[in-house]
Amino acid sequence: MSLCDRIFKLAVDDVVFVGHPTLLNADRPRTGHRFARQIQRKQRTEQSNTEQLVLHGDDQDDLGYNDEETIITPLTPSFEKSVTTPIISSRPLPQHQNPQNCSPAPALIPTPTMATHPSPLIGSSTATKSKPTISPQQQPHHQLSMFNLVFAVIPEDDQEGTDCEVHYVYNNILAKLTAALKYEQLKRGYLKKEIDIIMGIRDEFHNGADLEHSSLARMLADTFHAMTNPDIPSNALSVNHVHTHLDLNSSVDISILIDRTILGGTNHCYSGESDGMVGGMVGGGGDRDKDAEDDDGGALARFQATHPPLRPYQAVLLLYHAEEILKSLPADSAPLLHDLIEIVTPTQSLENLAFALSCSLAQVYRLVCHLVYWKKAKVIDVINLRNMYVVSREADLSRLSKLDNELTVRVKDLDLGKMLSVMSTPRAFSSIFKDKSVPYLEIIALFLRNNLIEQCRMKLLIIIPKQIWTLKPEFENYVLAQSVNELTQDSALIVRNPLYCNETEAQMIETIALTQPQPFPAIFQRFVPYMTGKVHSEEMMYRENMVRKDFKAFMRFVICFCHIIEEVNLGLL
Amino acid sequence: MRFAPIKAIFYSEFHPIQGPVVVYSVPEGSVVSGRPNETHKDDIVIFEHVSEYVIPKPALCNRLVSLTATSSRTIIGHPVSIEDAKYERNAFLFNLVFVFDSNDKTQPYEQVVRKMSRILRSLELESGLLSNKDTKPKVFSIMDQLLQDLNTYSNAESISVEFASPINLKLFQSRAPPATVHDWQVPVQVYHLARIVDRLWDMTILRVIPFINGALSVKRISEIADVELGLVRLSIQHLLYYGCVKLVDIFQYSNIYTLKSNNMLTLLENEDLQYEMLAFVRKDEHNISTLFTLLSSLKPGLTVKEWCEEHDVRSLNIDIRRLFVFGVLNNFLYRVHKYPVTSSTTVGSPTSMDLKKLSRFLDGKHHFDGLYCH
């Protein structure tokens, strides 16, 4: 009892058992059992008025769902696998756990909690509308009081990897399934019914029983197969993320995003076909083994790098065809999400998207986050011919032959290998395609969607060259004092952070501004706070409300006073 | 490295009449039976909640058992069952359990827990230390010393036990398995290995170390040192595991390097790193802004040779190889590899055997450095 309703992690040698022992009775306050208390209160009311009780049909709830309906997916569950085995265990009701003693509770929110993650793309369609139906299985004498869905995991990694894997399984899969099972048990007695079926089959056929007749067993087997050996759709862009739907009692549809990088077993890779001689020479990413080793930024830094804040000037690139995404949405998904998927293009900024949808930017952000979380879209900068792109460090070049075929279908006489070879050096797309008839937008979108290229961005730092710091003796003294023991007379001074610079540095920056032709002195001063090497040009233009053409003109004049660091934009997927 | 502190250690055994009981605990009161004091509720292990995993059923005995189920504590034990007719129920069950904070990394302690259970088991088998009422209090002094020594010094040396050898324990940092060492990679010494090496080290490592100079590749070291290539790889991997060397690519003027911009800013802010870099690369006096300006002009597609010519780097009299090695080791530069791939528009097929053999590497997974070694 005391270990219930919280994570339960037991490691025996190399096997970690993780579960969430769940009480179905609601005799304790502050345990998140409002829904259970509501059901029990109704039960008591119904029991006191048994004669007047009007039961709905056992086989059908008030939403029209058939409780006995089974999923038409022939699948033989296999619980003997050793890697990750879902096990259901139940315990008898303790003597002191009589539901009759439950205290009355407020009748609120009959919605199952889906952990702390964004609501699933395919959500429960029964959540708020349904009225709990009392079935014979829910009579107190036959009621299940406790259940625990347990996953057995054999992690392959060190402890950090083990903890990560176990918590991922718990938060993303187990907690969701447990919440859904609890809901279905309380509402329809589903779990009890299924356990009776399973026990019946076991009794009849002993251990070699085929559990296909139990929808619960099938669902657990589906979960197991999805986690250990997910079917990679042919059009999947990432073999590491698989989106799976689990149908529980034809009532709750649970969406699970399985991240194979966390669950281990990332050895799957696309087979690259060698058909012919050496074609293109592609400057790919850095040494991947070494990069993985060197990437010591920590989990938080990695999270920040892959999940930067959304900005109004950014755009959304759908990773699948819009119709395909719309088809996978649940019936009760937000109409605004439908509208967004229908109209979104990678050339349209989020700000314009909000305007087109007549909604707030915050609403658009929320929908975009939702799509990104479920790996249906990625956030990019608005696609423009003048954007600088370069072959991505993470590009999976083994997929080139497959993508080459895809590209040839869309654009004839275009060699993907040669294109990427050209793009190994950062350059604007307009300089690659002189021919305006080429559907460049489609090509960039294809490249970005497949993580073949990424955008280069410009960041600025102020340098104070010799001709400025030799103008005044105090400037010279200051620069020389900064360069003790490492002095060269012709070196420049880099201003590390103009926001917190001292008086002399500020004067030197002002002097630089004054050397610019009109109207640039004022513009230079406006941009000084952003020249920290951390703010990229798109952000500067947005914050200062400047169009690209004016910014370029400005850059032409101040170029000799700025360090330009070209940064490859990390993918946001 | 600091290890997670042990919050408590308790010794539990199966009493023939009372069942599982806590016999000793340090600090005292850290494990209680019944209701805990309200003020320290979260820090106390309530024995009844976890007793079935402390003195478990036979299936879990003689295995490492770790449980995280209470709000703030993880317990790790290795329950031991000794079957013998001399005991009241024909078996003696005990467990020395270590308690940690639930968020702590407990892996370094697993070997300690296993070893302690092994030691206590042998002490019981040899001298009946645990089952004898007179000698049992010795367990408490062992636990007390363990808690203090492991938390303070990360090791426990010479804990004396009557009639037995002293107990020696040490916590070891768990390291990730080292990366695969390829023939084309160049090991660079992170520490001055010649100063710390002694004659008791592995003979192959002793032979390899003089050639780890940041310029010779693994394959070349094997040739010069006259050591079998596989053994050189193993030696380097061993040194890599302990952080004595790091691996970089062979430096060539045809290499392409580019920036990791965020880490470049770290270089700008970190004065120690700047001095280290200047000391490592300069032959003449230079200041950091010169090198920073030079480095920030690197970009994908620009080879080192082109970069040198474009900026007249040779006139600065700096060690260019060292500059790139330093940049890669300190993670503000990375090497851009070239990956040859086949193309659908390529006409013809490979004719010679060499080209046929080569074509299987043109799948986008093998870069040129790797191809040269195949």
Image (cartoon, rainbow, N blue to C red):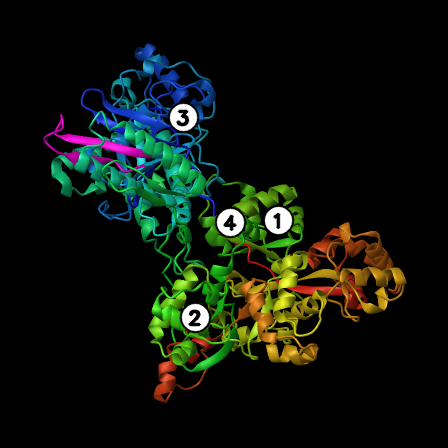
Nearer to us of marks 4 and 1 is 4
Q: Is residue B82 magenta-colored?
A: yes
* For residue A85, above or below residue B271: above
Mark 2 crowdedness (10 Å alpha carbons): few <14, some 14-19, many ≥20: many
Q: CA distance from mark 4 to mark 1?
A: 20 Å
Q: CA distance from mark 2 to mark 4?
A: 35 Å
Residue at 86 percent across and 64 percent down: it is: A516
Nearer to us of marks 2 and 4 is 2
Disc number for residue A310: 1
Which secondary structure lies at badge 1? Answer: loop
The amino acid on which the numbered mark 1 sits, given as a three-letter code, is: Leu
Residues at badges 4 and 1 in contact (C-beta under 8 Å)? no
| The furthest residue to the left | B85
- Residue B295 seen anywhere in this rendered image of the structure: yes
Chain of the residue under the numbered disc 1 shown in the image: A
* For residue B189, above or below residue B86: below
Q: How many marks?
A: 4
- Residue A57 seen anywhere in this rendered image of the structure: no
